[in-house]
């Protein structure tokens, strides 16, 4: 719990660090969704091929 509070204090000191954290989360979230769509499309096309 102490680590989370320390991380929040570091992020709250600078406005740009908050944007960087939110942007990093959004980037990896969208990247994960794209990979999930690719894996599902390849998986379903493999089922249709058999």
Image (tube, rainbow, N blue to C red):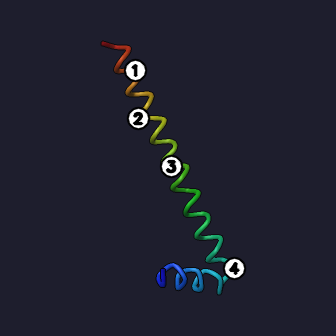
Q: First in sequence, mark 2 or 3: give its number.
A: 3
Secondary structure beneath disc 4?
A: helix
Secondary structure beneath disc 1?
A: helix
Which image quadrant for residue 22? bottom right
Residue 14 percent across, percent down from the top left: 66, 84
Q: Which residue is mark 3?
A: 31
Real-space Cα separation, disc 4 to disc 1, in angstroms: 45 Å
Real-space Cα separation, disc 4 to disc 2, in angstroms: 37 Å
Q: Residue furthest right?
A: 15
Count the marks: how many?
4
In the rendered structure, the answer to whether residue 38 lies left or right of residue 50 reads right
Q: Nearer the viewer, residue 4 or 33?
A: 4
Instruction: Classify 43 as above or below 16.
Output: above
Q: Which residue is mark 2?
A: 39
Q: Which residue is mark 1?
A: 45
Q: First in sequence, mark 3 or 4: give its number.
A: 4
Q: Which residue is mark 4?
A: 15
Q: First in sequence, mark 4 or 1: give its number.
A: 4
């Amino acid at each position: 719990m102490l680590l989370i509070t320390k991380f929040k204090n570091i992020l709250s000191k600078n406005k740009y660090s908050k944007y960087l954290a939110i942007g990093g989360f959004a980037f990896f979230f969208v990247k994960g969704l794209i990979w999930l769509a690719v894996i599902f499309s390849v998986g379903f096309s493999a089922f249709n091929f058999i």
